[in-house]
Image (cartoon, coloured by chain):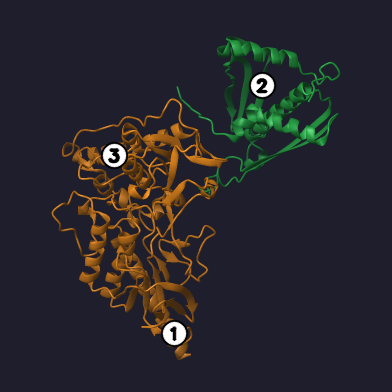
Chain colours: A green, B orange
Amino acid sequence: METQPNTIDNGVNVEALLGAREALKQAPEAARFAWRAASEWVRGTHSRSTIDGFFGLGEEQRHRQAYSFDSDHPEIFAAEDQGPAPVEYLLVGLAGCLTAGIASVAQNRGVQLRSVRATLEAGMDIQGILGIDGDVRNGFDSVRVHYEIDADASDEDIAAIVAQSQKRSAVFDVLTNPTDVMVTVA
Amino acid sequence: MGPINIGERACSTDVIVIGAGHSGLAISRFLTRRSIDHLVLERGEVGNAWRRDRWDSLRLLTPNWMCRLPGYAYEGDDPDGYMGKDEVAGLVSAYADWIGAPVRTGTTVQSVSACGDGYRVSTDQGAWKCRAVVIASGAFNKASVPALASAVPGPIHQVTSLDYKNPGQLPEGGVLVVGASATGLQLAGEIHDSGRPVTLAVGEHVRMPRNYRGRDIQWWMLVTGKLDECVGDMEDIDRLRRLPSPQLVGTPEQSTLDLNALAERGVRLAGRLAGVRGSRAQFSGSLRNVCALADLKMNRLLASFDDWAERTGYASAVDPRQRYAPTRTDTSPVLDMDLGGGEIRSIVWATGYRPDYRWLDLPILDRKGQIRHDGGVVDMPGVFVLGLPFLRRRKSSFIHGAEDDARDISRAVHLHLNRAASMRAMRIAV
């Protein structure tokens, strides 16, 4: 598909991204990023996590401001519901990542978006985390994401944009492929 | 003898025991001593599973001196050795002869159903009516293979630990062994030594040294009372019943078989096999954690042995306290492997076993296909089960563990028969 950068605006600076891609090809070590969060237990199942700095392009970086997130369990788990459940944050991450990808890919393909709405649902059998049944996994047994997209493009092109977004999504990759996780205690 | 038609003359006996393995024979001995009329039905020969359904190099995980059956102790010349599968079959056969067990070999049970105030057991050699049934057919009848096996690409040769006999059965080339119980580790070791490079998928497991402070680990398990721990004293019995067998092997050198030993021999460790996507196998990123858990639990167990030795004054009679290197995991564990590239030619599923109760026409199975029971007493009067992991005690599935369980269950059988008899007498009196 022809790129039409002048006629459409999804608010994504594709030129900058493509420029970064070229620059990083020459300096791949700068492409190593480290994302960070810090978390502190509040009480019960309530914790507060903060996001501030990260590492990338060869140096420490900061967000425009620090962000704070409360996580807890709902009241039906005899908790105080001071925030979303940690598993719900995974859905937030997936939605944010896929939709960012859709906007970027659409911009790159010259497709004007008017609205992009996603609903997400993850199935879980809590017999796993409660240790009732060893055959039941702890985590999601499925994740369903449904998009409703209004854009200047055919259904087929929209489907292709959504597919490409999944292909390049960090969170989609983390959820669908195994990751080495190491937890240490000081 | 030809089959007897349903509804025609069925022979009668008080108790039918299904399975002439060590558990079935142990209860036969106690039933005989209580003068209870019974029959032990066996689909093959005595000790059939040991003869046919085990890999060639299998040895017991317990030393010979521990392998006693009711009234029958090991008297061979290698008390610290470990019996091979044929020796176990020989022991079980010799025991059957010694107690004069009323065994019908070559008799496959086809159904067990309720019939009047007793049960009807139909076999390919005729039918019996009885007042009580003891199910001693074992817990290892079928290989338990995860559903994802069906997604494995066609050219890969697949074999379960129940069909596996020796490495020669496998094509040349790389082998993925799935499962880190005693079975998984033993097979991974011998397959790797046959020149087929092995990757071992490791989920939750139980790590133990073969010897600790100069004594067999099973000696410690026995003397400290671990093996005698009863169902009623344990929290979360379901978890204990599902526990994989400890990573042990019985070799003349009494060597320890753990993940470190296998890694030193060149076996590559991966996390639990989590999925197959297209032609790629995916392994969980939890390898470090399952190894850390197993190390922590082993050290806790050894510390409890140390405490016991101090308390009982045994500390001076055994070697000094030992600790073992933590399980080494790669800095970057394998997470994903191409099953289509020719590197892996076969998969060995060492993912456990489950019983086969297809012949059981009684409503006594839970939704997972296991018999619902309370220490071997099924909630259907006159039905009992023996020889399952942690049935009544930690040692329930051990050879020497059959004695206490069989004694207890024979008492329960006796009580049932007496109660049933007095009920019948009352009905006649009315």
Label 3 element class: loop
Q: Chain of mark 1?
A: B
Residue B231 placement (x, y as % from top left):
40, 55
Label 2: which residue? A68
Residue B32 lies, with reference to residue B274, above or below; the image says: below
Q: Mark 1: which amino acid?
A: Arg
Q: Mark 3: which amino acid?
A: Pro
Label 3: which residue? B209
Residue A63 lies, with reference to residue B288, above or below; the image says: above
Image disc number at residue B215: none
Q: Residue at x 40, y 30 (%)?
A: B329
Residue A129 placement (x, y as % from top left):
55, 42
Pointer 3 or 1: first along the chain = 3
Q: Same chain for the residues at labels 2 and 3, yes or no? A: no
Q: Residues within 10 Å of mark 2 (few under 14, many from 20)?
A: some
Is A49 left, or right, of B427 in this rendering? right
Q: Along the line of sight, which residue is nearer the eye, B70 or B139?
A: B139
For the N terminus of chain A, which image quadrant? top right
Q: In this view, which residue lies farthest toward the top?
A: A59
Label 2 element class: strand
Q: Quadrant of residue B119?
A: bottom left
